[in-house]
Image: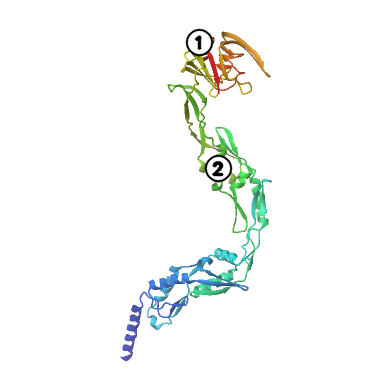
């Protein structure tokens, strides 16, 4: 009977203690050296956060010691896993009668590359990361050359593991000693040389960009090199890739500027009513390269495949603007204030028939070419001929034209007349005379009388 009573009391006590510590860390539990017995999950979580913040590591190499925090060494505490360890160990029935005390370490990870970077910055005479052999493009020789590998000095895996074990078991500042470890580069010169031969062959891959049957651009060896990148693989090889993002950069910085064309504005001259009387500059639409994402992908794919590649380009048309300016005329020459005269503008390549200060009509002409220009000044008409032959030589250029109609002569051998032998009106191409279309030449012939003024200016 007494034994039964003690058994009942023991079970009752065990259940009571289970209830009292439900959701709490059990007595005798330590987390990285900190007593967390009786703490709730939230309180344990706070301890974990504090442990992360308080991590400090004294690293000694030779006679030098430097201190780093968790972030500098790439140490991160996995709070969820650590809390789960405490919770799982606390979930024990009748724990009061068991050997339940536990020293629980922090669950953490470490980024070795960040620890290596910190070591290289703080112990530059000791640590230097290994450098893989690589390829570099020689623009002068237009080929890839090998950049030799370099052996480095790093933190050993053993020292990294010691760091993890020490930090996970102790709260606050800990001390470790590191012994530099020699590490070879993953990619050695021989592997790079193998890739070099392949890459140099790819530099000769024909990649042409066409538009409407015309070759607009052919990638150069330098262009192909700018698209090529190399990265080390797990087996120590140097792996080449043709990246579409690099191709896109080439299109943006080199190809598009070479192929895009800005529109050329059309320039029209108008009379006083606003009507266009001549075009001094013909408008030309522009173009802008489009579908550059697809183009970049096609270029990268073509180089990856290694065969000759032709890619059709796409452009969007940019309309030209039209600029209009009113044709301005000088004051009538003396004696012409109430009579007919002709205003000749060499800059605009126009002839305007004037009645005093009032323009009547304007025509596009062709004055003398730069090698034998039309003289400027004011002269009076001295002869008019309905049709005649014109011949002569200006320096080394000779001409001979029959049946030249509606000639109006005003100074030496200079005059207005038709020019059936060309259609370049608006451009200075003559031997000095003022060339006009036949109807325009007749209008000048009919407007001007002997003695009427012809004013020629730029």
Up the image or down, 158 lies above or below 232; here it is below
| Circle 2 residues within 10 Å: few <14, some 14–19, many ≥20 | many
Query: Label 2: which residue?
Result: 251
Q: Quadrant of the C terminus?
A: top right
In three-dimensional space, the C-alpha distance between marks 2 and 1, rounded to whole angstroms, equals 60 Å
Of the residues under marks 2 and 1, which one precedes in the sequence?
A: 2
Give me the disc on residue 235: none
Task: Place residue 67 in its image quadrant.
Answer: bottom right
The picture places residue 270, in percent across and down from the top left corner, at 46, 23
The picture places residue 133, in percent across and down from the top left corner, at 65, 56
Q: Nearer the viewer, residue 164 or 120?
A: 120
Is disc 1 placed on a helix, strand or loop?
A: helix
The picture places residue 178, in percent across and down from the top left corner, at 60, 71
Task: Place residue 158 in its image quadrant.
Answer: bottom right
Up the image or down, 373 lies above or below 51; here it is above
| In this rendering, position of residue 79 left or right of residue 20 | right
The picture places residue 309, in percent across and down from the top left corner, at 59, 40
At a point 57% along the width and 32% down the height, the residue shown is 213
Q: Label 1 near label 2: C-beta < 8 Å?
A: no
How many marks the image carries: the answer is 2
| In this rendering, position of residue 406 left or right of residue 7 | right
Q: Is residue 70 visible?
A: yes
Camera-nearest label, 2 or 1? 1
Give me the disc on residue 446: 1
Q: Nearer the viewer, residue 184 or 233?
A: 184
């Amino acid at each position: 009977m007494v034994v039964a009573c003690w058994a009942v009391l023991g079970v009752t006590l065990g259940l009571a203690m289970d209830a009292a510590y439900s959701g709490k860390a059990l007595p005798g539990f330590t987390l990285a050296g900190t007593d967390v017995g009786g703490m709730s999950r939230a309180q344990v979580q706070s301890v974990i956060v504090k442990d992360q913040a308080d991590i400090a590591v004294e690293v000694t190499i030779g006679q030098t010691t430097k201190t780093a925090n968790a972030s500098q060494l790439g140490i991160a505490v996995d709070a969820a896993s650590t809390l789960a360890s405490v919770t799982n160990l606390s979930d024990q029935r009748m724990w009061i009668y068991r050997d339940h005390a536990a020293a629980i370490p922090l669950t953490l990870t470490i980024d070795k590359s960040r620890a290596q970077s910190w070591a290289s910055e703080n112990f530059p005479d000791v640590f230097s990361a290994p450098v893989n052999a690589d390829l570099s493009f020689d623009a002068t020789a237009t080929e890839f050359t090998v950049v030799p590998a370099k052996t480095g000095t790093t933190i050993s895996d053993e020292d990294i593991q010691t760091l993890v074990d020490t930090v996970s078991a102790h709260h606050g500042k800990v001390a470790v000693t590191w012994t530099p470890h020699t590490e070879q580069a993953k990619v050695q010169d021989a592997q790079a040389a193998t890739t070099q031969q392949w890459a140099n062959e790819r530099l000769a891959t024909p990649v042409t960009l066409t538009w409407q049957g015309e070759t607009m651009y052919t990638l150069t060896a330098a262009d192909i090199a700018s698209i090529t990148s190399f990265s080390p693989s797990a087996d120590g090889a140097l792996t080449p890739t043709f990246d579409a993002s690099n191709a896109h950069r080439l299109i943006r910085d080199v190809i598009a500027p070479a192929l895009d064309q800005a529109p050329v504005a059309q320039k029209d001259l108008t009379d006083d009513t606003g009507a266009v009387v001549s075009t001094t500059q013909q408008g030309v639409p522009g173009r802008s390269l489009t579908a550059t994402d697809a183009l970049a992908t096609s270029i990268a794919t073509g180089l990856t495949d290694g065969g000759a590649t032709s890619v059709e380009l796409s452009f969007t048309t940019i309309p030209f603007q039209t600029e209009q300016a009113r044709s301005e005329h000088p004051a009538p020459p003396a004696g012409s204030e109430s009579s007919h005269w002709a205003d000749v503008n060499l800059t605009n390549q126009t002839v305007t028939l004037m009645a005093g200060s009032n323009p009547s009509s304007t025509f596009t002409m062709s004055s003398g070419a730069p090698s034998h220009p039309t003289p400027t000044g004011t002269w009076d008409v001295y002869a008019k001929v309905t049709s005649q032959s014109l011949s002569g030589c200006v320096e080394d250029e000779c001409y001979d034209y029959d049946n030249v109609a509606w000639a109006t002569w005003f100074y030496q051998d200079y005059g207005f007349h038709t020019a059936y032998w060309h259609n370049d009106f608006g451009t200075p191409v003559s031997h000095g005379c003022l060339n006009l279309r036949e109807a325009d030449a007749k209008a000048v012939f009919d407007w001007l009388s002997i003695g009427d003024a012809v004013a020629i200016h730029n």
